[in-house]
Image: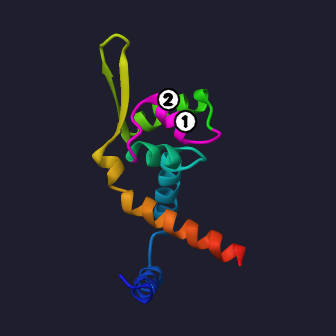
Amino acid sequence: MKSTDIHQKAKQILSELRDQKEEIQALQDAIYVIGGKWKLPIINSICNGNKRFREIERSIPGITTRMLSKELKEMEANQLITRTVTPTSPVLVEYFSTEYCYSFGDIILEMIKWGKAHRERIRK
């Protein structure tokens, strides 16, 4: 979709009468589930093939073990990831993105694209 088409579609959507209270609640719900400093980088890490706790931790500079553990539990509770335990010796614990998580993959890719463009714009 061309940039002008996207702008026209956004303008059309934003010009229609909408329930602002409902929209604010929906935005707050979305931010609650994927907001914060670490959730999107964790999702990105898992989607890029990092399945084990230490792999995820090493792929995200600055995240602490405690924070990663907390965020993974919240993400599992919100059905964004699944935790699979294989009873081997040692026990194998792996994390996988759910289909539900993939449902906002396009949004994440657009955020990455926007973030790159923003960084470039600010540098100029």
- Badge 2 marks a residue whose secondary structure is helix
- Residue 105: x and y in percent read 37, 57
Give neighbour class at mark 2: few <14, some 14-19, many 20+ (Cα, 10 Å). Answer: few
Left or right: 91, with 63 as reference point? left
Q: Which residue is mark 1?
A: 58
- What residue is rendered at 42% in x and 80% in y? 13
Q: Provide the residue span drawn in magenta.
A: 48-62
- Residue 118: x and y in percent read 61, 71
Give neighbour class at mark 1: few <14, some 14-19, many 20+ (Cα, 10 Å). Answer: some
Q: Which corner quadrant holds the N terminus? A: bottom left
- Badge 1 marks a residue whose secondary structure is helix
Q: Nearer the viewer, residue 91 or 40?
A: 91
Please say whether residue 71 is visible from this viewpoint: no
* Tag 2–tag 1 contact (CB < 8 Å): yes
Distance of label 2 from label 1 (alpha carbons): 6 Å
Locate residue 68: give its quadrant.
top right
